[in-house]
Structure formats: structure tokens, C-alpha cells
Image (tube, grey):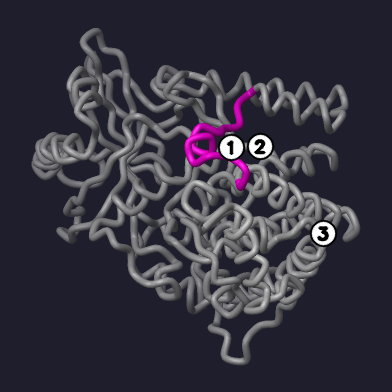
Amino acid sequence: MSVAERATAGKDARAAASRSSHGEWAPAPDRADPIALLQVEAASRVPELVPIRHGRMAASPFAFFRGAASIMAADLAETPTSGLRAQLCGDAHLANFGGFASPERDLVFDLNDFDETLPGPWEWDLKRLVASLAVAGRDRGDPEKARRDTVHATVRAYREAMRRFAGMSPLEVWYARIDAAAIEGQAAAARFSKTQRARLDRTVEKARRKDHLRAFAKLVRQDGGAPRFASDPPLLVPIAELVPEAEAEALHAGMRELIDTYRATLPEERRTLLDRYRYADLARKVVGVGSVGTRAWVVLMLGPAGEPLFLQCKEAQASVLEPYTGASEHDNHGERVVRGQRLMQAASDILLGWLRSPGLDGIARDFYVRQLWDWKVSAEVETLEPTGLTAYARLCAATLARAHARSGDAAAIAGYCGRGEALDRALGAFAESYADQNARDHAALLAAIASGRVAAETGV
């Protein structure tokens, strides 16, 4: 069909779910207990790390929201959808966007977490984003009007970006990206204050310094002249401290074999690059909020002259979307993450790959592999001025639209969204209603911790 015909098909999809219907939110009468859902997730995680996850989620309603992707997925499954689909991030809250290095060594802005990626209704990602803005706005103390204005601006940015992508060729959409120059343009358009502009400049500079040499200085010590991971339990624990010496040596040997397995998932020319480095050490590292308790390892590799390369091997479990969208077509969830990331991101890590490995308990699990600290940086949402938060939210929305346009029908989605403000108003109402629900769920976690139903370790 032509672009116009696909846009018309998108408008026709409003018969299945009007744009105003997205503003309606109330918990289902049989809504699952959110604490029970967290406990189900905990069952497959490292037991001694689960209390850290709960402690981090208890810190604030926004921290809870970050770890509650499975809870919101269950809620979103009960909401109206247009029937239009795209590859989803699955956890598109505002802290899962940020800057990182492109293969060309430019700083680009994009989605940066794909643990839950699967094809599904495009609305779910956008609703997760706007709800995160409402929750974060409350944590910041922003008044309700300011929060709604930010959400309206975010949805408008998504609509406008999708309309632009609808008019592009598939190749033009594929090449589209947001780089440092585009971020500078957003800052100028938003008329950042001198303070806000200085913070932006410091953030960009911080990103450029966050590389393998910085990781080496922070994470590694010299042990008899050989570089080894430093010990900082429970956040960073070398393999030698997790198991007896003989078992540690066997795991080191096994890791060398697993690197060969991972190597096979890379394009041929990048295998040649990886071959320039040799395996040196392994440690368990706690990362994020929602990911705490899943198995995450960091691998130290060394080049011919001792140049460091850090790889992160992060466990990939089934997506929280899977019960509602259907199983992944990929048998390995690490591959599911990598394929989804390559489909949605404008520029992906050149060493992105996957493997399946037996854990310390002998159970085989899926992992994806990427570089650690390759200019990766996120906005400090709590310090952004209102104009800065809105500008950042608009960047996130345009980025999300481009990610959806790479796999979905941009013309149909743009046709459904329309040029008016109906969807903006609806999602403004949804975001506030869901922020209310999130506050209740956060309070339930605090009560469960206080009663002893849930174990939590704070300040870690």
C-alpha cells in the first residue's frame, strides 16, 4: 500500500481502540498482588542479592517503578491497543535512555536497555515512558500541571517524529540517529539556563571519560604484577572469592571456552578484533535496579601490550512481555536481546553477542555480552530544571518513535496518532492514574518489608 493508504489504515484502527480510550486506567478486579509478582521473579535470581534489589526498589516510587516492569506488563495487557505492532523495548522508562559511543566514536543518544525486548503493541512502550515521567515528576516535587505538560510534550514529540519517519524511505529511517549535535540543538531550542547548560556539558564530558581505561583504574588491582578484579562485595566479587581455588581455576578455563562460544555470534571481522585480546579475570557485578539478582559478570581481557577490554555478560531471562505477547522466536534469550537491540538501536556495540553457560549451580542460563562503560551515561533526572526535563523527555520520545519505525509501520502508527492532541490528553490522564497505582504498589512493598514478608537491604 502507499503511505497514504497505510496512514488511512492506521486511522481505521481507532475503531478497535479510540485514542481517548488510552486515558482510562483502573486496576483489574483480579489484579495480581504486586509483591507476589516480585517474589516470583526473585525465585530465579541469586538469593543473596535479592534483598539488595528490594532495598533499591524501596528507595522511592521511581526506584520501585524501575524494577516493576513485570507488574506494569501485566497491567498493560489489560489496556486497549490499536493492533499495530513493532519491536518493543519492553522497559522504556526515561532512565533507560542515554548516551554511549557509536562504532564511529561519536556520542549518540538512544535506548540502552533491551532485557525485555519483544514484538508487541507500540502503545505499551509509550505508556511506560509517560508513566515514568509522571512518577519521576512526583519524586521531584513537580506540580501536576507541570507533569501533564511534560507528558503532553512527550506524546506530541512521538507523534511528530513518527510522522517524519512515515515520509522517509526505510534506508533513511535506518540511518536516522540523535547525536551530540542534535542534543545541543535541543538545549538551544529549550533555552537552557547557564546552570543547566553547564550540567549538560559536564554530562557529555563525563561520558567521554567513561571508557575501558577508567574502568581499569576503578575496578582492577595489581596482584603480584598481574591485573585482577578488586574486591568490593557485594557489588563486585572476584570469582576467587565465590568458590574454592580449585573450582575457580576450572571456571577460568571454562570461561576461556565460553569466550569462543560468544565469539561465534560476532561478525567475522569482529572475531578478528576479539582475537587480539586474551582472557585475564572474571568477577560478579551487581548492576541497575530491576536487574539486581540476575547473574551479571564482568570479564577482563588484555591486549598485546596489556590494553584493557572489559566485557559484561548479563543474564537474559524470558521477557516480562512474553506471557502477553507470546514466546520469543529465539531459543536463546541472549540472542533475543541482541537481535532486538540491533533492530531498535541506531548504532549498537560492535562486540554485542550472546552465549549459554552453566552457572555456579550447574544450571545452564542465557547471557548477552557487551562492552562495559563504553561512554555510557544517563541524565540525572532529579537535577534537571523543568525545561531540561521536557527537552530530555522529547528526545526520549523521538528516539522511541525512530526505534518503532525501524520495525513497525510508521505511516500506520502516525495515522493512528493523528495531528491533534487527543492522544496527548489521553496519555496525560493515563500517566497520572498509573503514577497513583505505582505509589500504592511502592507502599505495599514498604509494608511487606516492615512486616518481614520481604527481605530488603538498603544503602547498597
Q: Is residue 50 left or right of residue 331?
A: right
Range of the magenta residues? 166-180
Q: Residue furthest bottom?
A: 29
Q: Is residue 54 left or right of residue 369?
A: right
Which residue has dot 2 on it?
379
Between the residue at mark 1 and the residue at mark 2, the CA separation in whole angstroms equals: 7 Å
- Closer to the camera: disc 1 or disc 2? 1
Circles 2 and 3 in contact, beta carbons < 8 Å: no
Q: Residue 429 falls in which quadrant of the image?
A: bottom right
Identify the residue at image location x=24%, y=34%: 266
Image vertical order of residue 355 relative to residue 255, above or below: below
Q: Nearer the viewer, residue 338 or 440?
A: 338
Identify the residue at image location x=70%, y=74%: 437
Q: Residue 16 falls in which quadrant of the image?
A: bottom right
Instruction: Name the amino acid type tagged 1.
Output: Gly
Instruction: Name the amino acid type tagged 2.
Output: Ala
Q: Position of residue 198 (x, y in %)?
A: 77, 21
Image vertical order of residue 308 relative to residue 388, above or below: above
Identify the residue at image location x=71%, y=75%: 18
